[in-house]
Image (cartoon, grey):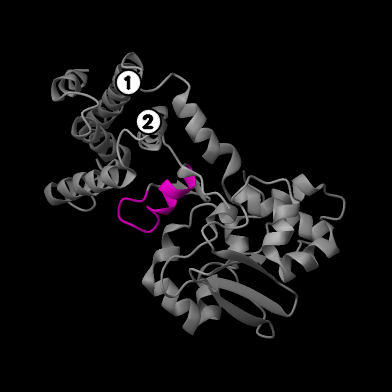
């Protein structure tokens, strides 16, 4: 039986602290940009621009940094904001984009 | 709008703009196309999730022979249905269905880890991983089920199924009464992931909210 990459990618996150929010057994997105950020990371790992595990380590690291500098119940928490940060880091780490290119996104 | 709420709204807009800019950059570099994200997410949105399990349960409700086979040889029964590949289990683990009856209620837990038949049930709810839930479900299932809103008659026997890396259990809930004239698709809409974990009944008529 074949395991799809999409299948594997989410299964590897289940129950871990970087596991995405879900509702009624589905991954859920509060807005379109969350969905896009999720899909881009998955697509790039699937096509081999970076390893899924490397992205996950960056995500765990990014979430950890946020938690160290914010209260646990800080209402400004956004899972997909951390996801987006981790994705930007993964792109630089994999040399898909330069730090300057990512910085230019920050000006938006 | 209160001043205090302006910041998160700005942030939402900023994040949205950043993702859009990032996507444009990647399209420009020829790394993705505008359809990439929809294509990869289509898998989760159309092929993977609790609606697969709901279809399996609905078939079992209308077809007693299928139900018998589903309990006897779950992967073979699932393979008969028109579901995406990978449904019958991947990487060697097997799914096993257990059927509720008026006398026996089945509850699925995993005391060691978070094994979960997610091709059928979707992604597990957060509390499924909770060590307290897992331990208490084994020790005092009746009390735990009551807390989750499922009060069983004392005469009903509760069987606990502990999922493992080898076997992932799911429950065929009882068909709700008053559903005789319903189509298979209508029946499937009554089957929730919780019902297939044994922490709820299939939704009664009129109780459907979504």
Using the image, name the chain to which the residue with label 1 belongs: B
Where residue B188 sits in the image (x, y, percent)?
A: 71, 50
Q: Name the residue under label 2.
A: A40
Relative side of B41 to B69, left or right? left
Depth check: A40 or B192 in front? A40
Q: Indicate whether B10 appears above or below A81.
A: above
Residue B26, numbered circle: 1
Q: Give the range drawn in magenta.
A: A6-19
Q: Do the residues bearing badges 2 and 1 touch, measured as CB atoms within 8 Å?
A: yes
Q: Indicate whether B3 appears above or below B138.
A: above
Relative side of B92 to A17, left or right? right
Where residue B51 sits in the image (x, y, percent)?
A: 63, 48
Q: Which residue lies furthest to the right in this view?
A: B181
User: Does residue B209 show up?
Assistant: yes
Where residue A43 sits in the image (x, y, percent)?
A: 40, 33
Check if residue B75 falls in the magenta segment.
no
Where residue B192 sits in the image (x, y, percent)?
A: 62, 55
Residues flagged by tags 2 and 1 on a common chain = no
């Amino acid at each position: 039986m074949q395991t799809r990459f999409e299948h594997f990618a989410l299964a590897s996150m289940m129950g871990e602290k970087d596991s995405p929010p879900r509702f009624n057994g589905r991954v859920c997105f509060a807005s379109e940009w969350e969905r896009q950020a999720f899909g881009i990371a998955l697509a790039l790992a699937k096509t081999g621009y970076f390893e899924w595990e490397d992205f996950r380590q960056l995500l765990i690291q990014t979430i950890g940094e946020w938690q160290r500098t914010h209260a646990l119940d800080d209402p400004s928490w956004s899972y997909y904001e951390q996801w987006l940060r981790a994705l930007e880091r993964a792109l630089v780490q994999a040399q898909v984009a330069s730090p300057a290119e990512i910085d230019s996104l920050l000006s938006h | 709008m209160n001043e205090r709420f302006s910041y998160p709204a700005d942030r939402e807009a900023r994040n949205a703009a950043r993702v859009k800019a990032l996507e444009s950059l990647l399209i420009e570099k020829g790394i993705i196309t505008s359809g990439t994200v929809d294509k990869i997410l289509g898998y989760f949105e159309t092929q993977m999730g609790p609606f697969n399990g709901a279809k399996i349960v609905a078939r079992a409700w209308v077809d007693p022979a299928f139900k018998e086979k589903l309990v006897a040889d779950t992967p073979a029964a699932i393979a008969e249905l028109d579901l995406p590949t990978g449904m019958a289990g991947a990487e060697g683990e097997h799914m096993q269905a257990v059927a509720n009856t008026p006398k026996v209620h089945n509850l699925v837990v995993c005391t060691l880890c978070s094994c979960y038949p997610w091709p059928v049930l979707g992604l597990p709810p957060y509390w499924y991983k909770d060590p307290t839930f897992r331990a208490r479900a084994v020790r005092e299932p009746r009390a735990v089920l009551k807390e989750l809103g499922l009060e069983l008659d004392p005469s009903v026997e509760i069987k606990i199924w502990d999922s493992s890396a080898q076997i992932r259990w799911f429950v065929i809930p009882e068909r709700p009464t008053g559903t005789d004239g319903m189509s298979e698709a209508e029946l499937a809409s009554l089957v929730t992931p919780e019902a297939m974990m044994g922490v709820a009944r299939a939704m009664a008529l009129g109780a459907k909210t979504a």
